[in-house]
Amino acid sequence: MTAVAVVLGGCVIATYIAGARDWAPPIGWTIALALGLRILVAVLARGHTPGDVRVNFQLVTSHVAHGRDPLIWMRRYTWNFLPVMPHLWSLLGHLHLSWETTDKIPAIAADCVNTALVVALARTRNLLRGFQYAVNPLAVLVVAWHGQVEPVALMCILGALVLLRSRKFGIAGALMGLAVAIKTWPILLTFALLRATPRRQWPVVLGGLIGVPLAVFVTMPLVSDAKLGKDLGILSGYRSYVGIGGWTGVVRMRTNWTYLGYSGPKQSLEQHIGVGLLAAALFVVMWVWRRAEPEILMLATLLMFVVVTPGFAKQYLMWPLPLAIAYATTPTWCYIWPASMFAALGYLTDTPPRTLIYISLFVVAGALVALPFDQRVARRKSEPFVAAR
């Protein structure tokens, strides 16, 4: 734990120095640094990988390898996604590496690609932004310590944005569809995807967005004992783990700490409230940023999710991170640093739940401050963009 804390402390210092001196190493060096840093933390994490990855993801992969449908065979709420990643992990199992290594190979590889995509998407100081993402503690922890699948979904989303700039609408839609197939939350970005697409191309984009996850879903009985009707109910019934941060965490501090988890009368009510809050938040974002660039609309959407979500899992905090760094302004860091601190304390220490909830409120406040109100209107090509260091 101490060694990882030292590494992350060095990352924070490097971020500040690079910003102050406008230091931007070549992209090859930055990607090599991102890879080395994540491998180092993954090695230090051996024996400490969180239980959802260490136990549940391994069990999901075992079910897939033996032709069993994980949506049916897994305990409720522990796997609510299409089995794209378990199939990939099953293939990587032929390398005969330890599970903690096997699981993290796709996450580490994808996040190195994300580093390059941040460089491609940033408006100015591209190489600096790539470096700042490469050494960001939140990204390093979610990818290398936790081994979650967020970076793989993010790679597809960021790749789709790059392709949209090249007007490759069909491939961009298919990449977004793959992101949805990997983990359901990218569906929140559908409006931003269409915002970036000429209306005459909407059928092409929506065809890819819907077609890829649909193809994965309908072919599940070919490779497993899937029952599609039951699977559809499980997929649509996804819930997050409530009470550990954000507004549901505040409720726990004032009521009963035993009401943590996915289900139960109190949790179910909060889940429904959360859906309503998210729907209202998405409407507000779509209206306020209706004239913004699609990347900014996506960033605003993901920051608002952090504000209203009833669940507050550490990996969720990574969702806005690549775009937040690519389009960083001074207020953006008001989100990035509290989110990094929350993740570091949650992963590496036995910080009391009450303390983590208090810190989560700084994350929520930071997300509100970081909302890109100054970028509500797409800039003209000749208009300069001034970002914070």
Image (cartoon, rainbow, N blue to C red):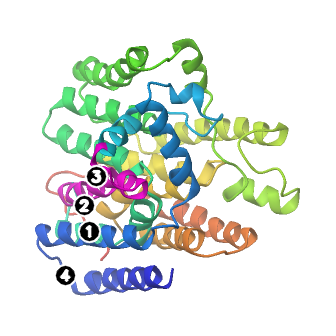
- Earlier-in-chain disc, 1 versus 4: 4
Camera-nearest label, 3 or 2: 3
Query: Which residue is labeled 3 in the image?
Result: 110
Q: Mark 3 and mark 2: span between their CA atoms?
A: 9 Å
Viewer-nearest residue: 185 or 2: 2
Above or below — where is 182 with respect to 29? Answer: above
Query: Which residue is labeled 4 in the image?
Result: 23
Q: Mark 4 and mark 3: span between their CA atoms?
A: 24 Å
Q: 158 left or right of 301? A: left
Q: Which residues are magenta?
A: 94-120
Q: Residue at x 55, y 19 (%)?
A: 232
Q: Position of residue 264 (x, y in %)?
A: 81, 38
Q: Mark 3 and mark 1: span between their CA atoms?
A: 11 Å
Query: Which residue is labeled 1 in the image?
Result: 34
- Earlier-in-chain disc, 3 versus 2: 3
Q: Amino acid at mark 4?
A: Trp
Mark 2 neighbour density, 10 Å: few (under 14) some (14–19) many (20 or more): many
Q: Mark 4 and mark 2: span between their CA atoms?
A: 16 Å
Q: Residue at x 52, y 41 (%)?
A: 59
Q: Mark 1 and mark 2: span between their CA atoms?
A: 8 Å
Q: Residue at x 38, y 67 (%)?
A: 42
Above or below — where is 143 with respect to 212? Answer: below
Residue 297 is inside the magenta segment: no
Disc 1 and disc 2 in contact, CB within 8 angstroms: yes
Mark 1 neighbour density, 10 Å: few (under 14) some (14–19) many (20 or more): many
